Amino acid sequence: MARLFGFSIEDSDKTPPGVVSPVPPNNQDGSEHYVSTGFYGSYVDIEGKYKNENDLIRRYRTMALYPECDSAIEDIVNEAIVSDTNDSPVSIELSNLKASDGIKKKVREEFRYILELLDFDKKAHEIFRNWYIDGRLYYNKVIDQKNPSEGIQELRYIDAAKMRYVRQIKKQGKDSLQSLKANFSKDNPATYDFPEIEEYFMYTPGSSGSTGGYSPQNQGAKGVRMTRDSVTYCTSGLVDRNKGTSLSWLHKAIKPLNQLMMIEDSLVIYRLSRAPERRIFYIDVGNLPKVKAEQYLRDVMMRYRNKLVYDANTGEIRDDKKFMSMMEDFWLPRREGGRGTEITTLPGGQNLGEITDINYFQKKLYRALNVPETRIQGDGGFSLGRSSEILRDEIKFSKFVGRLRKRFSAMFNDILRTQLLLKNIITPEDWEVMGDHIQYDFLYDNHFAELKETELATERINLAQLYEPYIGKYYSNDYVRRQVLRQSDEEIIEQDALIEKEIDSGMIPDPMEPDLPLGSELGVPEAPTDPIQAPPVPKEPEAPLTPKGGEI
């Protein structure tokens, strides 16, 4: 096998030989084994899969050009990527990362450097949109091969139609198929020795949506095999489990969009054909034979028929009598004994304003794209009221956008890992521990979920105040915190530590100390005792003197 293009970062922590499993490595990213064997050796056959995925990508991109579908996509992208003049659309969050401040500082610096390479502040919208439509995103991590410790020098976007992720069985000392059959013929399934898999990317720069891969029938196709670490690969997370193909979030909307387009086309045809009023000419042919009657009818029709046609290309108006359209008048013969020549009018369509079916399929399209149906109407207002005024669809939409952000953040994780390892800031073993604790905060401007949380917190605090007189009598403090305020064990430990810290620093008073004079807990001096400043205290009236001698 020829050497792969790019670089590789070796992980010293291999799977111990004693760890065995009858289950092969899972395939969750839509890659497949495109490996075949023959007399002349092995080749990578991506004919069927490549063509299928390219067809899907082209269909997704065509769907994105449809106005209703484009509007829904823009709603999703605008919710996920919020552009602000002052802040970046995304920032890194390291509060859960257990590392030194120096490591955290370097991680933040490298993440800012990655955002500059991507030009994310300016291109965030189109990067996320391309990933959402295609269902996958590829970036080539370009480094200086002579000095890799300088890190990534450039991130180049790769068209998804020209790239494939391939898993290939490494060539064994003997025939790999016979080895695999021998392994599966063992009695103990725990002793299965699955072949070693090599992962790489197949880049076909000459393909423009057509099939391009290595196969005996297509020897002229050229491709470049690139290493796994030299390419950033981020998918939508949706996989067709029957075919093993990565799908886009637009896949569910293929059928509703086709139905909507057909309904709209049929509606246009119906309205064009039924809108004009047409006339019916009953021509009296007397006792003429059939042939002569037909000839007479044809002569009368050509004599009085005048079809003016407007040529949009030249701007000319001409009398075109050679063609007959569906919107022309009707000419019918009438025999002797009838009412003679008569002209009646056929009315046009009466229910041309009915678009109930159009609205239905529009709503169905939005439901397929997980966008609230209320966003179809552009005149809908935005109110920041109580949660009872917030539609459930908006809450679901907010959670859906959050899932998209989590999936899209895998791109940042992969690039950041490569950058930190190349600069020797961390080791591969360190990343296995740190990777799950690095989070990414996106700017957020959908306030529906925030309003819901705020109102829930308000109701819980009010309920806790009602429980307060009965704490220590019927309810414990722990019960109120867990059942009323809904605090978890981690939150209770965290809040207790923060409260103790703030009490020790003097930021807040200790609630267990006895009550102090008003203002003393805040460091405010007591009321002045200077008689000049203090207001005069009214004297109490003296008691009446008791009469002497016991007189009453």
Image (cartoon, rainbow, N blue to C red):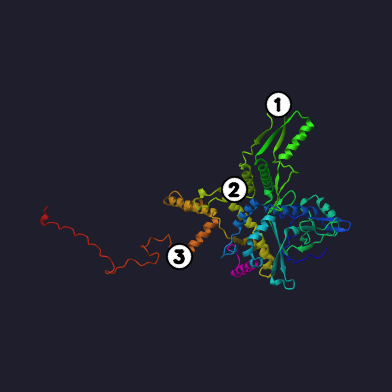
Nearer the N terminus, badge 1 or badge 3? 1
Residue range of the region highlighted in magenta in the rendering: 95-114
Q: Are marks 1 and 2 in contact (CB under 8 Å)?
A: no
The amino acid on which the numbered mark 2 sits, given as a three-letter code, is Glu
Q: Residue 254: say if magenta.
A: no
Of 501 and 534, nearer the camera is 534
Where does the image place residue 398, in percent across and percent down from the top left? 58, 53
Which is in the foreground here, disc 2 or disc 3? 2
Q: How many marks?
A: 3
Q: Left of 293 or right of it: where is 465?
A: left
Q: Secondary structure at mark 3?
A: loop
* Residues at marks 2 and 3, CA–CA distance in whole angstroms: 49 Å
Residue labelled with disc 1: 337
Nearer the N terminus, badge 2 or badge 3? 2
Where does the image place residue 317, in percent across and percent down from the top left? 70, 49
Of 533 and 431, nearer the camera is 533
Q: Residue 113: say if magenta.
A: yes
Residue labelled with disc 2: 373
